[in-house]
Amino acid sequence: MIEAPVPLPAQAAVVPRGEALRRGLRANPLMALGAVLCLLAVVVALFAPLLAPYPADAGSATHPFAVLQPPSAVHWFGTDNVGRDILSRVIFGTRVSPVIAVLVLVIACVIGIPLGVVAGYFGGWLDEVIMRVTDIFLAFPPLLLALALAAVLPPSLTSLVIAIAVTWWPWYTRLIRGQAASVAGRPYVESCRALGIPSYRIVLRHILPNSVTPLIVQVSLDFGGVILTASALSFLGLGAQDPTPDWGLMVAEGQNYFTTAWWVVTFPGLAILCTAFAFTLLGDGLRDLLDPRRTFLR
Amino acid sequence: MRLAITGLQVSFGARRVVDVDELHVGAAEIVGLAGESGSGKSMTTLAVLGLAHTVGATVRGSITLDGTELTELSQRELREVRGRRIAAIFQSPATAFSPVFRLGSVVHRALRLHGMSRSEATEAASRAMRQVLLSPGLLDRYPSQLSGGQLQRVAIAIALALRAEVLLADEPTSALDVTVQAEVLEVLRELRDRDGMSVLFISHDLAVVAELCDRVAIMREGRIVEQGPATRVLSAPADPYTADLLAAVPVIRAEAGP
Amino acid sequence: MTAAAGGRQVSAAAGGQGGTLLLDISELAVRFGPVRAVDGVSLQLPPGPCGLGLVGESGSGKTTIGRAALRLVPTSAGIVRFAGKDIAGLRGRALQDYRRAAQIVFQDPDGVLDPRMRMGTTIAEALVAHRMAGRRAAAEQARDLLAEVGLDPAFAARYPHQLSGGQRQRVSIARALSVRPRLLVLDEPTSALDVRAQAAILALVGRLRAQRNLAYLLITHNLAIVSELCEQTAVLYLGRVAESGPTGALLGRPAHPYTRALRSAVPELGNSPAARVVLPGEPPDAANPPPGCVFHPRCPLAVDRCRAEVPVLRPVAAGRLAACHRAEEVLATSSASPGPAPASTAEDSPPGSTAAAPPA
């Protein structure tokens, strides 16, 4: 007697991936918001020269007569201590800060995830070696390590990315390793081994997908953190240099004028806030989307 | 009737998971509530304990304990009833006790909470442990040092020490080995015979229910499809669902020859 | 045919063709640190169709034996031979072949399927990994397997959380069957299931046994299901075999006090508890087993010899082996199953098992 499947409630019925995505977006407005904001940032970055009212201000232009002007019709976000239009610099900043953050996070993932998965799944001496190396990196205060590296490398955006990425990956390795080890102990993994499925397949098709969920959230939360780390380094003179319109650098440099000219710090700060927020929303939504158990009932 | 459940409806929003017209347990009686998973047995237990709201369910209907209407009591009043007059033991003995406390302190605290003095509590605890065939010295140990069967018996001992009138046992032996299960069932029988306790025994194992219970109610999708004396229901069922369940129980085929 | 020589035993098996044993476990020992999970166990299973039951409570080592037979745990001593070859020495191609020929179905239907994979993909996974079929052909076979275990092929597109426990267990069986094994180890296949789902799984195993000439090792604490599905049974206690023999005879007239206690402890419909043998105390610590016979602290028949001397598993009747100094006595005094057979139900006997209602 063949048993027929009980019909599932409409939302939980089997849907092709495209439809599921669309439904997910509709049911999860916050994630949609995050996606839209991120998209906005990308668009702004692409069309920066067209959108910015004073594109030259994003470069080395200075206007000694328009120093520290409050927000007005001419300068929506005011001007900074050398008279540059802050709006234009914020706009061009979308080409700098978010890009640094994304690059750092991607590199950290590319290094951290494979190491973590391998350490967690195989265990034994491999685990020991990888985790001890990770521990060594983790033992250094991140900023100090990044500083040391950035000091050795020539000051540039590339060095900045490398310096921060090097201090960032160990956290991901540790996070993934715990997850991978836990997944590796589950009955379905043991059943794969019993079926003679080769290790690389088990790692790619079972361990990896089931381990990355907490990482997705962590990465999205780290976006803002990377930008701020980058700003600290840039402020100390390593990494982004003036006149590069790095948001973090703008915030760091504008601190001196905060009491008299609040706009110098606030607008770049808001830009960081918005993009970090958008990223976080996106991360949350992505995690929900990837969970096959979620029925989008809201 | 000690415990009388009438017109009980437990729902999660629009979805009703329990719809029991009538179920009662008398003094010195073991009543079995049997059914498959999802039939609503555990939700019934939670409703009787006044804990259904903790999982988001709403309760309607009447649950009386010796005449007291439990559904009308406040949470504070219910806390007096829980443990003291209605005790409960659950399926997983390993998670029933906090691993960081010695069993003695847990038992002691339960007894003191319900009004016993320090000396009374110690005395009652020792006596109850002996009644469940455990050495009182075991109370000095941590839960991890006792087996599942022993922990279940400690849980029963608490009910005994508090002189509870009703014991709700939700699948108490499902996680235990069969020889250990036999001991726990024996203890439950003693509770009925020696102490006159009323026991509502919830289980999916019809054979255990057949052996232990005086009366049995068969539950299906929230409703009771059949109830009556255990010997009658489980040997000559009136409802086809009951017959179905009984037919599915595997039977030991043993041979007489060497 | 029974023979015993210094510890090695051969248990006769009904059914199946003669020739090389499919599974030959000899003096197996598995130690986890100080804990002796398995301590000198020997079992044989001929090629299918055939069933051997491993019965025991927690700590008996039955699950570990099943895993050791599939090389899922390292062994400390003893040899496991599959179709004549020592599995410990297998490498490469031979190991892959072995992995296909011997499969296991686990107890817990919840954790045993990847929650992110659809059922069809899960079942077809091994086929694709072993290159036994291309992706499309594997999907086709997966649907056939679903039908074979009694599920509508529409289940292929579903996720585990959309299935019931019994259904998940069947998918798990389908997955094990995908590689066409000759030996199936079933580790408590029904403990987590409702009674009707349980009956369905048992019927399924019976069907598969006939259709696929399957040999299986059924690991369980449930005496009723071994009596339904296994011709031979071995009762385990603390990592050792207490007794073994044809299931019906073993359950009807036990030759070991533990079997007798176990049998009497099982609640049955229509059985009264009056004939119960109550075992005092708890199962002993596997890291510190008692001297002599490991069962003696709880045994109602223990004598001085039991405290001093470890009993050897030896033949006590035709086809029956028992590790007890007083086995003959136990056998002689064992009556048929306590209590009359229940009046209610009349089940069909599955093919292969001999069933006889004992006299009242």
Image (spheres, coloured by chain):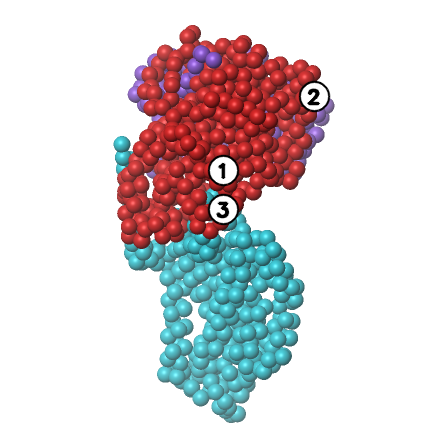
Chain colours: A cyan, B purple, C red
In the figure, is residue C223 to the left or right of B157?
left
Give the residue at x 62% y 68%: A142
Closer to viewer: mark 3 or mark 2: 3
Q: Are marks 3 and 1 on the same chain?
A: yes
Question: Cα distance, mark 3 to mark 2?
Answer: 40 Å
* Residue receiving disc 1: C81
Query: Residue C220's spot in the image, x, y percent?
Result: 47, 29
Do callouts 2 and 1 mark residues in contact (Cβ within 8 Å)?
no
Give the residue at x 49% y 25%: C11
Give the residue at x 33% y 16%: C346
The amino acid at mark 2 is Ala
In the figure, is residue C262 to the left or right of B102?
left
* Residue receiving disc 2: C308
Give the residue at x 54% y 61%: A115
- Classify mark 1: residues with Cα within 10 Å, few (<14), some (14-19) or many (20+): some
- Residue C29's place in the image compared with C312, above or below, is below
